[in-house]
Amino acid sequence: MNSLTPVSAELVEFYDDGEDARHFHFRLLDSGLWPDTQPGQFFMLSVPGAGEVPLTFTQLPDGHQHWWALVRKMGAVTGALFRLEPGAIVGARGPFGRGWPITTKPEGPALVIGGGCGLAPLVSLTDRLLESGQAPVALIYGARSLEARVLSRERARWQDQLALFEVVEHHPDHPGRQTPLDALPKILQTWGHTPQAAFLCGPEAMMTALGRDLIQRGIPEESIWLSLERRMHCAAGTCGHCYLKHRYVCQSGPTFSWVELQPLLPPTSDHQKVPLHTC
């Protein structure tokens, strides 16, 4: 059972990575506390005097307990984190939740789709799929604007490793609104593979619309997986902020299969606009 008491961690370094977003490098001061962290899990970061916030791993803890996380400045806790300098001490709890259901040998081509900061929970998954080397991988990334795009270093690294398609909702050179859902038919035709599995993270309306489209294209429902970022405050299933019908996202998720998640979500109109921006 994970402790509710944070352990000490050092803020090693950071760099700006998108609009009001930074990529932070942390190090646990006690070794061996977070073994076997899985892609898709999250942790709780506490800033002294400000509070605690859930964050996803973009790079999993290594043998020296170093890890990375993407953070967008959105409230009091993240604002306080942005004011810290390298060498500052923060608190951390984790890892929590259920990660992505990946194996070392994917059975077929894998499609990864992220919207906005929803790309962050997909980074370690994408790297794990690439490391397996067993099947082709395509990644679709949608952002609100050119300035809002995140994880620039990861996207640059993936250019030579997978089929990367970027969609900008409001692009100065392309009139009209463009989302991953709009671009999906052309992207699949360009890629030339039929996905056997899909991994999605972003606004719930975007994921629902994409999931329905992928099912119509023949991807089995049980091979579509989604990650939710839903108001997790305690990571212990006690505060109730992430309650989703009879489930707690922090305990049962944040990763769910399409089959188990659909009965839990409110209905989404097929005509509802699909937003991309999220964190």
Image (spheres, rainbow, N blue to C red):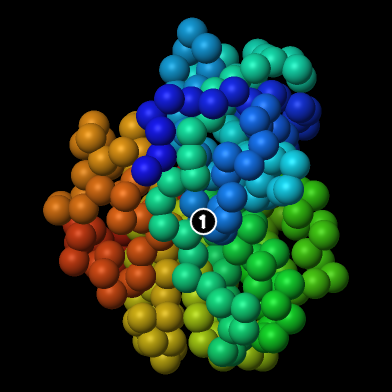
Q: Residue at x 48, y 33 (%)?
A: 93
Q: Looking at the picture, how far across and down is residue 5, in whole percent?
A: 43, 25
- Nearest the camera: 44 or 144? 44
Most foreground residue, 250 or 258 = 250
- Please name whichever residue, 9 or 250, is drawn nearer the observer in this view of the structure: 9
Q: Give the residue drawn at x 76%, y 19%.
A: 86
Residue that appears at 37% across and 43% down = 1
The answer to whether residue 142 of the structure is visible from this angle is no
Between residue 178 and residue 88, name the one nearer to us: 88
The answer to whether 140 is drawn above or below residue 89 in the figure is: below
- What residue sits 70% from the left and 77% below the top? 132
Give the secondary structure at mark 1.
Answer: loop
Give left or right: position of 54 versus 189.
Answer: left
- Residue 11 visible: yes
Please tell me whether residue 59 is drawn above or below residue 161 in the rendered image: above
Q: Residues within 10 Å of mark 1 (few under 14, many from 20)?
A: many
Residue topped by disc 1: 40
